[in-house]
Amino acid sequence: MHFFKSAATVALLTGAYVVSAETGERGDAPITENNSDRVVYEAVFSSSNIKSARFNFTGTEDGVGVLIHACFTGVNASQPGPYPYHVHDFLVGPNGNCTATGAHLDPYLRGEVTACDADAPETCQVGDLSGKHGKASTEAAKGTWCTSYVDKYLSLNSDDEAFIGNERSIVFHNANKTRIGCGNIVLAKEQMSGGGSYPSANATATSTGEPPIATGGATRVGASGLALGLILAIGAMLL
Ligand SMILES: *[C@@H]1O[C@H](CO)[C@@H](O)[C@H](O)[C@H]1NC(C)=O
Ligand SMILES: *[C@@H]1O[C@H](CO)[C@@H](O)[C@H](O)[C@H]1NC(C)=O
Ligand SMILES: *[C@@H]1O[C@H](CO)[C@@H](O)[C@H](O)[C@H]1NC(C)=O
Ligand SMILES: *[C@@H]1O[C@H](CO)[C@@H](O)[C@H](O)[C@H]1NC(C)=O
Ligand SMILES: *[C@@H]1O[C@H](CO)[C@@H](O)[C@H](O)[C@H]1NC(C)=O
Ligand SMILES: *[C@@H]1O[C@H](CO)[C@@H](O)[C@H](O)[C@H]1NC(C)=O
Ligand SMILES: [Cu+2]
């Protein structure tokens, strides 16, 4: 819920209800482990408004989090930037329909209402890559702009709720949130021996059941949020 951890003490001392970051209804996103650096997922797409977007996702040497490389080339300069981009819940629809990708990957149900606080990334929607790591620069409208980072909350393991390999997609937005490009995240490589240092946890194992569906945050702000905030504040006092 909308409750800022480091503001807990302030809230306790002043009795004030501080809204800054929003923890999911199901808690903060856990740091993921066992992400093999022999596994590579990709998302590559283009649209009338972006010449190319290329993502790759691999595990890390110590298995913690997912290493992401992303490059954006030739964004139509008439599209206002900087550009947010996210992991969305569903595959791209027929004819490149970005609306069909649904909402952001948000297995811990923190919703959209409160913006992601990059200083508390565990409280952000798991799929909110630009919220946690910065929006794509308007340099992408002049040529190519690339970025690279480890996101500690995505997973390459099919039994993890933050798994990105079960029919997820990437959506690229303009500054006013219009979806201007999208593409599916697909398995590019799973090397079972050699080549990497972290053992494969078998990310291709078939995932069972429905993917968790982000429902958006609108229904979760209000009295229950306030109550939970107070309960958490009291809990923090007891620690
Ligand atoms: C990672 O793998 C180790 C060894 O198989 C296991 O003990 C641990 O529980 C795994 N961690 C997660 C988060 O699955
Ligand atoms: C991921 O993309 C970066 C930048 O384009 C590239 O240097 C790197 O080789 C790619 N890694 C994999 C595993 O595809
Ligand atoms: C860029 O977008 C504008 C406005 O939508 C459009 O008129 C123009 O044709 C686009 N440019 C290219 C190169 O697609
Ligand atoms: C968002 O930006 C696009 C491209 O500039 C424009 O066509 C659209 O009308 C804008 N939408 C809003 C809600 O401002
Ligand atoms: C795009 O997908 C959405 C959601 O699935 C659907 O409602 C809409 O009709 C589709 N639009 C087109 C042009 O197919
Ligand atoms: C990974 O999963 C696939 C599909 O279930 C299976 O065929 C393969 O043997 C597994 N590989 C390992 C190393 O467990
Ligand atoms: Cu999005």
Image (cartoon, grey):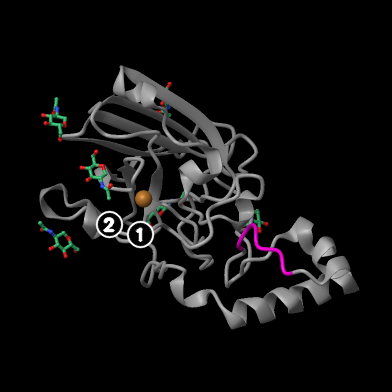
- Where in the figure is residue 192, as x and y percent of width and height? 45, 40
Count of labels in the image: 2
Vertical side of 63 occupied by 100: above or below: below
Q: Farthest residue toward the top?
A: 143
Q: Does the magenta stretch include residue 19?
A: yes
Residue at figure coordinates x 40%, y 47% from the top left: 86
Vertical side of 15 occupied by 98: above or below: above
Q: Determine the secondary structure under disc 1.
A: loop
Residue at figure coordinates x 24%, y 36% from the top left: 45
Q: Which amino acid does label 1 sit on?
A: Asp
Residue at figure coordinates x 61%, y 57% from the top left: 123
- Which residue corresponds to mark 1? 89
Instruction: Tell me if label 1 and label 2 are in contact, CB under 8 Å.
Output: yes
Q: Determine the secondary structure under disc 2.
A: helix
Q: Nearer the viewer, residue 179 or 54?
A: 179
Please provide the residue range marked out in magenta. 17-22
Q: Is residue 39 visible?
A: no
Q: Who comes first in sequence, dot 1 or dot 2?
A: 1
Q: How crowded is mark 2: few (under 14 residues within 10 Å), some or many (20 or more)?
A: many
Q: Say the numbered circle drawn on residue 101.
A: 2
Q: Which of 149 and 56 is in front in this view?
A: 149
Q: Say the numbered circle drawn on residue 118.
A: none
Q: Nearer the viewer, residue 62 or 112?
A: 112
Q: In this view, does 45 lie to the left or right of 32?
A: left
Specify the quadrant that holds the C terminus.
Answer: bottom right
- Where in the figure is residue 228, as x and y percent of width and height? 68, 78
